[in-house]
Image (spheres, helix red, strand yellow):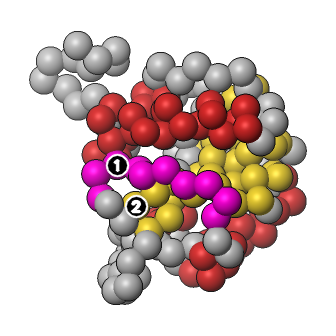
Amino acid sequence: MVKGWKAGRPFTVCGNGSLPLATANIRRTLPQWCAKHQIQTVSDAGAGDMKWMAGIVWDVTYRPFDLFPRSPEVREIDITTKRLPKCDLILCRMVLNHLDDERIDMAIAQFRKAGKFLAATQFDGDKLPKRSPQFTRLDLRARLGEPIERVQDGNEHICSLALWRL
């Protein structure tokens, strides 16, 4: 039985992308990236209920943030208007995909003020769907260039968590 799961209740309110199987690659890879790039502080911009992170063993100072905190440890922030505390890595998984183009640019501008690296959801493909009000398969390369690292994220072969230097 997965920690945090109770019969008759969903594991997480944060959606299928936060289920243990969908996050296995990321939970293995994040500590490796942190060691390789000497990342010591992580600000999670979109921490949700933090359940998917159970089992990550890494030697970093981790600070969780979300627009709608779902756990007492998570601090409230609007990443489009407020700067996160200075950190080595901003983790922004499955968050920018919910914003319109203007707010994506606003968030990235705030991230550049706070972090050295950004790990965010990246979709690759020749014909990604047009923007949707709920969730868009977003290609961030036009805004950030080619990522320096990537790992498959979830069950879609075109989805990865990608790492950029800010």
Please tell me which residue is depicted at 13% across the width and 23% down the height of the picture. Answer: 8
**146 or 101, nearer to the observer:** 146
Q: Which mark is residue 121?
A: none
Residue 95 visible in the picture: no
The N terminus - image quarter: top left
* Neighbours of disc 2 within 10 Å: few (<14), some (14-19), many (20+): many
Q: Is residue 57 visible?
A: yes
Residue 54: percent from left, percent from top: 46, 22
Q: Residue at x 28, y 29 (%)?
A: 11
Label for residue 154?
1
Earlier-in-chain disc, 2 versus 1 = 1
Left or right, residue 161 beside residue 17:
right
Q: Nearer the viewer, residue 50 or 141?
A: 141
Disc 2 marks which amino acid?
Answer: Cys
Q: Residue at x 32, y 60 (%)?
A: 157
- In space, the residues marked 2 and 1 are separated at their CA atoms by 7 Å
Q: Residue furthest left?
A: 8
Residue 129 picture quarter: bottom left
Please rate how many residues cluster around mark 1, counting C-alpha atoms within 10 Å: few if below 14, some from 14 to 19, many from 20. Answer: many
Q: Is residue 162 above or below residue 158?
A: above
Residue 70 vertical position relative to residue 104 in the rendered view, above or below: above
Q: Secondary structure at mark 1?
A: loop
**Dominant SS type (magenta):** loop
Q: Report helix, strand or loop for mark 2.
A: strand
Q: Is residue 152 magenta?
A: yes
Magenta residues (range): 147-156
Q: Are marks 2 and 1 in contact (CB under 8 Å)?
A: yes
Q: Position of residue 31 (x, y in %)?
A: 62, 31
User: Residue 141 at what x, y percent from top left?
Assistant: 60, 76
Reading the image, the residue beneath label 2 is 159
